[in-house]
Amino acid sequence: MSGVRKLSAAAMIAALVAGLIAGGSGAAAPKVHRYTTHGRLVVLDAHTGVGDVKGSASGKYAAQIAHFTVKGNKVSGTSVSYNSVGSTVGPFTLTLKTNPDGSTTYTGTGRITAGTGLYRGARGTVKVSGHTAKGATIGYFTYKVTVKY
């Protein structure tokens, strides 16, 4: 797997945590929220990616920043996501696979460990799947989020 593809896929996973803030409902008492979001992420350098996520639950956009390391076909790091009503943070891990056509697919998980604003005290999990075209630095993702806030 080329360095660019590894980095692209690594940064892409960071978008998974952004999905958890995109679907906020504004509930006063802590409540479990489940939803699916879609995002894209651009690799800036060997350890940083930025992107956006649109939440299907609320239609709100979230911006996110990820810091990560790549070891073989494994990626790990932390992602921080922001929107107008708060932010979330959490670690993630990802497994990369290079396909015969040169594209990369990835699957992984993340955790939501903290939040601010509407998401204060947020805790949850995220399952991710996605892909990057051969030679691309932009990846596209789908996130399945379960979060309590």
Image (spheres, helix red, strand yellow):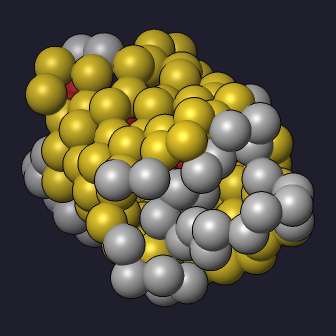
Question: From where the camera sits, is residue 99 visible?
Answer: no
Nearest the camera: 65 or 131?
A: 65
Image coordinates of residue 95 in percent, x first then y, are: 60, 41
Image coordinates of residue 84 in percent, x first then y, are: 34, 53
Q: Position of 145 compared to 53: left or right?
A: right
Residue name at image x 13 percent, y 28 percent: 44
Nearest the camera: 110 or 131?
A: 110
Residue name at image x 73 percent, y 69 percent: 27
Image coordinates of residue 87 in percent, x first then y, are: 49, 40
Q: Position of 137 compared to 23: left or right?
A: left
For residue 32, above or below residue 21:
below
Residue name at image x 16 percent, y 19 percent: 45
For residue 131, above or below residue 50:
below
Q: Quadrant of residue 11?
A: top left
Q: Position of 92 compared to 21: left or right?
A: right
Image coordinates of residue 135 in percent, x first then y, are: 12, 50
For residue 55, above or below residue 141:
below
Residue name at image x 18 percent, y 54 percent: 138
Question: From where the camera sits, is residue 101 visible?
Answer: yes
- Quarter of the picture containing the N terminus is top left
